[in-house]
Image: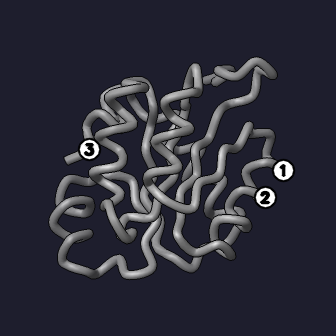
Amino acid sequence: MSFESSISGAPVALVVDDDQFVLDAMCRVLERAGFEVWRAESPARALSFAARLPAVDILLCEALMPGMSGCDLARQVAGLHPEARCLFTAGQPDSPEITERIVAHRLPLLPKPFLPSALILKVREVLEAPVTQTAAGTV
């Protein structure tokens, strides 16, 4: 499956994490893999980007962030880009909120820490999943 949403023809990834080190690392890996990457250190900044972008192929976001959960962010991004897929990352994958809102609903989750190869593998898996697994399906 080919994703060519941006002017450059590259798939568009909106990456959100409140940890600058993790954010930078994920963005570098995705850029090297050929993605057009938009980085946001907060959900508010991510929504600002999402409102201006013509398309978002995948939203990669930390499940637990100050100010807004990853699920709430995914729902809002889906309102702007219903076709967007979502991959959650989590430093605390066993927390009750993640267990109840992400794991229980079988939403794509990549626990931290992860290797760059695991990130790319999971992103490709999410992008190639059936269309029913979009950010719009986030609880």
Residue occupied by mark 2: 28
Residue at coordinates 35% horizontally, 76% vertically from top-left? 93
Q: CA distance from mark 3 to mark 2?
A: 26 Å
Residue occupied by mark 3: 138
Q: Amino acid at mark 3?
A: Thr
The image shows residue 69, relative to residue 87, as above or below, that is below
Marks 3 and 2 in Cβ contact (< 8 Å): no
Q: Secondary structure at mark 1?
A: helix
Image quarter of the N terminus: top right
Q: CA distance from mark 2 to mark 1?
A: 6 Å
- Image check: 79 left or right of 119? left
Estimate the x, y position of residue 64 in percent, counting from the top left. 35, 70
Residue at coordinates 53% horizontally, 57% vertically from top-left? 16
Residue occupied by mark 1: 32
Residue at coordinates 29% horizontally, 33% vertically from top-left? 136
The image shows residue 116, relative to residue 138, as above or below, that is below
Q: Amino acid at mark 2?
A: Arg
The image shows residue 113, relative to residue 4, as above or below, that is below
